[in-house]
Image (cartoon, rainbow, N blue to C red):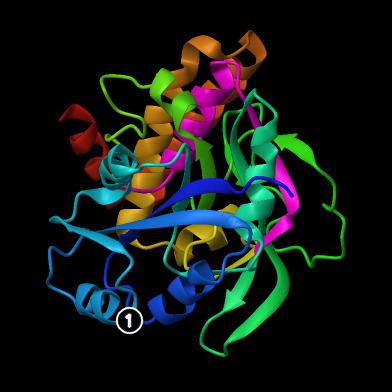
């Protein structure tokens, strides 16, 4: 009989009540793994999330703060975790009953610091689990851009093999806390300059350049009601039009942070491609979306 893995599950809530009955019940139903669930309510009690969780899922440990963003919120939750593995999970998800068990098996390899399962799209409004891939983990281009492997493809088993990836999507990622502690910078695991968006890419790069591996486990399945897609079908201009103002600001600004944080690790070829790509992004926003451009310039000086 195999020994159960122990996982601390961290979830940040922000007006997430509509998802919680499904998400938390799927976590309560996890098999062959011991879990604790720690939750941070980022509305500081101004939503109905906490009252619902306290009533329906009393086993969940709840903390309340003002909105600190994704990175700072998960850094706090990691500091509260009592188990050696930390599952960073979005509330807009549901999980197969063996999701955490199968995902935790990747950590039998000592050099694995993070892992991703196969995330599929969840059509929440129609309560349908689809076979459209949301993410099979993060991959990196030579211009230091990141994309979700398989995103928007129909799942026909084309990714049903255990492989190493660059890192997991922040929607559902499992981390080895001892590795996270070793790559802290200025006391931070997730870089708190990233309020939200691309913080998972930054952490993936930290672990990768520190020499750790990240595993994709196809048998660990979950479903995600994604509201912002990094790789929707269509041109760059079409995707830009679908993004809100703040998402565009965070995307542009945090790409600059990513490049700054990891420039020293890039090859000459990657540096040329990365600089060209970032320059083109500056020109695009200057010409076509000046509000975003000047907001990013202002935040970059702060």
Residue 225, x across and y down, in percent: 52, 71
On screen, residue 32 above or below 274: below
Residue 12, x across and y down, in percent: 32, 58
Residue sitting at x 78%, y 38%: 163
Query: Quick one: label 1, few (<14), some, or many (20+) residues within 10 Å?
Result: few
Q: In the rendered image, which residue does mark 1 sit on? A: 56
Does residue 155 appear to the left or right of 124 in the view shown? right
User: Quadrant of the rendered structure where residue 195 is?
Assistant: top left
Q: Is residue 93 visible?
A: no
Q: Which residues lie in the magenta part?
A: 196-221
Residue sitting at x 80%, y 42%: 162
User: How many numbered dots are placed on residues in this image?
Assistant: 1
Residue sitting at x 65%, y 49%: 103
On screen, residue 119 above or below 182: below
Does residue 189 appear to the left or right of 125 in the view shown? left
Residue sitting at x 58%, y 55%: 33
Q: Quadrant of the C terminus?
A: top left
Of residue 157 and residue 284, the one placed in the foreground of this image is 157
Magenta stretch holds residue 211: yes
Does residue 55 appear to the left or right of 264 in the view shown? left
Of residue 80 and residue 119, the one placed in the foreground of this image is 80
User: Quadrant of the rendered structure where residue 79 is?
Assistant: top left
Of residue 227 and residue 284, the one placed in the foreground of this image is 227
């Amino acid at each position: 009989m195999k020994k159960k893995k122990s996982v601390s599950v961290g979830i940040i809530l922000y007006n997430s009540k509509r998802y919680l009955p499904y998400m938390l019940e799927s976590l309560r139903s996890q098999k062959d793994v011991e879990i604790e669930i720690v939750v941070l309510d980022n509305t500081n009690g101004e939503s109905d999330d906490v009252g619902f969780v306290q009533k329906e899922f009393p086993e969940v440990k709840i903390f309340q703060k003002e909105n600190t963003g994704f990175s700072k919120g998960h850094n706090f939750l990691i500091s509260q975790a009592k188990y050696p593995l930390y599952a960073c999970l979005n509330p807009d998800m549901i999980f197969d009953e063996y999701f955490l068990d199968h995902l935790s098996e990747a950590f039998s390899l000592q050099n694995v610091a993070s892992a991703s399962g196969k995330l599929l799209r969840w059509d929440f409004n129609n309560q349908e689990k689809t076979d459209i891939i949301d993410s099979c983990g993060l991959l990196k281009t030579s211009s230091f851009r990141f994309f979700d492997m398989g995103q928007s493809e129909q799942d026909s088993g084309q990714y049903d093999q255990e492989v190493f990836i660059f890192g997991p999507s922040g929607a559902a990622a499992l981390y080895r806390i001892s590795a996270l502690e070793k790559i802290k910078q200025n006391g931070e695991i997730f870089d708190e300059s990233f309020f939200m968006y691309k913080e998972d890419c930054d952490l993936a790069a930290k672990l990768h350049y520190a020499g750790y591996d990240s595993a994709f486990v196809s048998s660990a399945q979950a479903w995600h009601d994604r509201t912002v897609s990094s790789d929707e079908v269509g041109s760059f201009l079409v995707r830009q039009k679908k993004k809100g103002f703040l998402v565009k600001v965070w995307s542009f600004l945090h790409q600059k942070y990513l490049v700054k944080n990891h420039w020293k690790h890039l090859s000459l070829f990657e540096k040329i491609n990365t600089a060209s790509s970032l320059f083109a992004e500056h020109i695009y926003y200057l010409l076509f979306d000046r509000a975003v451009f000047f907001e990013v310039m202002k935040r970059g000086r702060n």
